[in-house]
């Protein structure tokens, strides 16, 4: 099996040799000593992960050449994961590099075991993104960019879609809110012989019961007060195509008999009508409710359930789909970055970590919402936990020394307390439990304006 390629960029020949020796068993290691040789290796070897010392000739004591090399690498290959190596006192330069697209940074002196973990994680993320791009190129007519998934539960869903698309059998799609039930219905429609026909979705829970019958079955002129003209219902509009009854668990009990008759006979009358209409429309239903419980409580007809659930597709929540979340996140990031014309190339290491721990109660809809907002608001090239509004106090200070974390927390608390007290020094000092002179000293140290 071919080893993944790692590029080490460092002007020190001894460090290049040590690093190559440390990683050669696990990776195909190539080395470069400056910007020119690094870009040449990038073209020749296509490394997925690169370690980059910011101090490169012709200015090995500065960082400008390293920053420009980073920019050139990402311009040539935006997907490459660049791990920046910095001096212990160069934290601000490391943050600049992260802001310009570096995957991560590590301070000197290098701890090989720590670097191994970061490199292994970088290759893992690169592989996920590679699989996402491959899936985009090879997706069949069943899937779409919103229905990516390599997890076993989603592969089972895709296989069921392929099987049921060839028939006209009713399908019940069950899953938590935001799992993509409408996308499954749309995939079934587009993979079926009805793909050129209409596709209509009606949300049964969003329409008042008094209006739902007319909305679904249509009505004749004069059939009730306000019926000034004949109206074609959604069932008729779906002739030759597919009708999706979303939130079928909220379908009124009084109308369930009329819906059952249509499913059994493909026949219906408009409200106030006397003529039976034959309609050729396939019905798909979706719900996030427990219809078995609804039947036991007398809120849903058993005969309607079995007529709707000829085939049952259960969508797993995002938290049970493993690495699918990262595939979806990258697809959404690329879509919204392109739509907003912003140079956002990926997620920070901290963002990936917190995204994998987060339970995603709103599923794909929540993931999409957070990424869309983050891309609009971010000023960087990689989304952070703060951009995604998923930051925790611990993650915020990850990668900082204890002294840096303490100072950052102290400055933040002073600023917030000062703002809360509208700049009043006495009240701020009292709330923080320090004297006025001590507070003045802290304001000066952290360059905090009143």
Image (cartoon, rainbow, N blue to C red):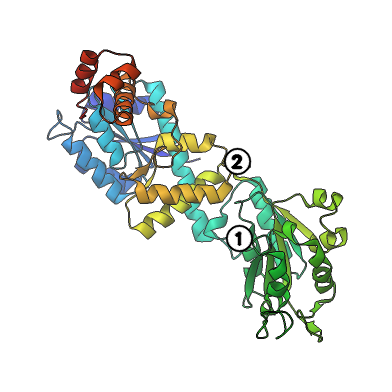
Q: Which residue is mark 1?
A: 183
In this rendering, is residue 13 above or below 203?
Answer: above
Residue at x 50% of width, y 44% of height: 326
Relative side of 92 to 416, left or right: left
Let me know if residue 166 appears in the view.
Answer: no
* Residue 325 x, y percent position in the rendering: 54, 45
Label 2 element class = helix
Pinpoint residue 139: horizontal percent, then vertical percent. Answer: 55, 60
Residue 217 in the image: above or below residue 87? below
- Which x, y percent locates residue 124? 47, 38
The residues bearing labels 2 and 1 have C-alpha atoms spaced at a distance of: 18 Å
Q: Where on the picture, by quarter, is residue 282?
A: bottom right
Residue nearer the viewer, 270 or 155: 270
Residue 49 image position (x, y, % from top left): 37, 39
Look at the image and tell me whether residue 298 can be seen.
yes
- For label 1, the SS is helix
Is 165 left, or right, of 417 in this rendering? right
Counting other residues with Cα less than 10 Å from the Cα at mark 2, is it few (<14), some (14-19), or many (20 or more)? Answer: some
Report which quarter residue 279 is drawn in.
bottom right
Residue 340 — which label?
Answer: none
């Amino acid at each position: 099996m071919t080893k993944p390629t790692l590029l080490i960029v460092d002007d020190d020949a001894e460090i290049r040799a040590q690093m190559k020796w440390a990683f050669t068993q696990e990776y195909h290691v190539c080395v470069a000593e400056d910007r020119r040789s690094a870009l040449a290796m990038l073209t020749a070897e296509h490394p997925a992960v690169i370690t980059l010392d910011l101090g490169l000739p012709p200015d090995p004591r500065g960082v400008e050449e390293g920053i420009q090399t980073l920019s050139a690498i990402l311009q040539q290959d935006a997907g490459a994961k660049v791990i920046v190596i910095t001096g212990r006192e160069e934290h601000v330069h490391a943050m600049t590099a992260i802001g310009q697209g570096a995957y991560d940074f590590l301070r000197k002196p290098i701890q090989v075991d720590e670097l191994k973990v970061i490199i292994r994680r970088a290759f893992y993320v690169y592989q996920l993104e590679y699989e996402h791009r491959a899936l985009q190129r090879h997706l069949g007519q069943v899937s779409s960019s919103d229905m990516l998934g390599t997890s076993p539960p989603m592969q089972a869903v895709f296989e069921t879609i392929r099987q049921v698309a060839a028939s006209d059998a009713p399908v019940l799609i069950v899953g938590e809110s935001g799992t993509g039930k409408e996308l499954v219905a749309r995939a079934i429609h587009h993979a079926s012989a009805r793909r050129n026909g209409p596709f209509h979705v009606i949300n049964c829970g969003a329409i008042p019961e008094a209006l739902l019958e007319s909305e679904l079955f249509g009505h004749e002129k004069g059939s009730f007060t306000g019926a000034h003209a004949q109206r074609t219902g959604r069932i008729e509009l779906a002739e030759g195509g597919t009708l999706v009854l979303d939130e079928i668990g909220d379908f009124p009990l009084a109308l369930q008999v009329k819906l059952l008759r249509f499913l059994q006979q493909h026949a219906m009358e408009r409200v106030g009508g006397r003529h039976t209409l034959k309609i050729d429309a396939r019905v798909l239903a979706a719900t996030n409710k427990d219809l078995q419980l609804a039947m036991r409580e007398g809120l849903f007809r058993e005969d309607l359930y079995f007529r709707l659930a000829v085939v049952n597709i259960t969508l797993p929540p995002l938290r049970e789909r493993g690495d699918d979340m990262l595939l979806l996140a990258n697809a959404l990031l690329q879509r919204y970055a392109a739509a907003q014309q912003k140079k956002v190339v990926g997620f920070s290491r901290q963002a990936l970590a917190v995204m994998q721990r987060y339970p995603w109660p709103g599923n794909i809809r929540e993931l999409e919402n957070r990424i869309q907002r983050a891309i609009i608001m971010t000023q960087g090239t990689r989304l952070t936990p703060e951009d995604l509004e998923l930051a925790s106090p611990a993650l915020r200070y990850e990668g900082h020394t204890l002294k840096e974390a303490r100072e950052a927390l102290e400055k933040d608390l002073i600023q917030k307390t000062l703002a809360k007290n509208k700049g009043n020094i006495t009240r701020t000092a009292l709330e923080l439990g320090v004297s006025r002179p001590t507070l003045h000293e802290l304001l000066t140290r952290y360059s905090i304006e009143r």
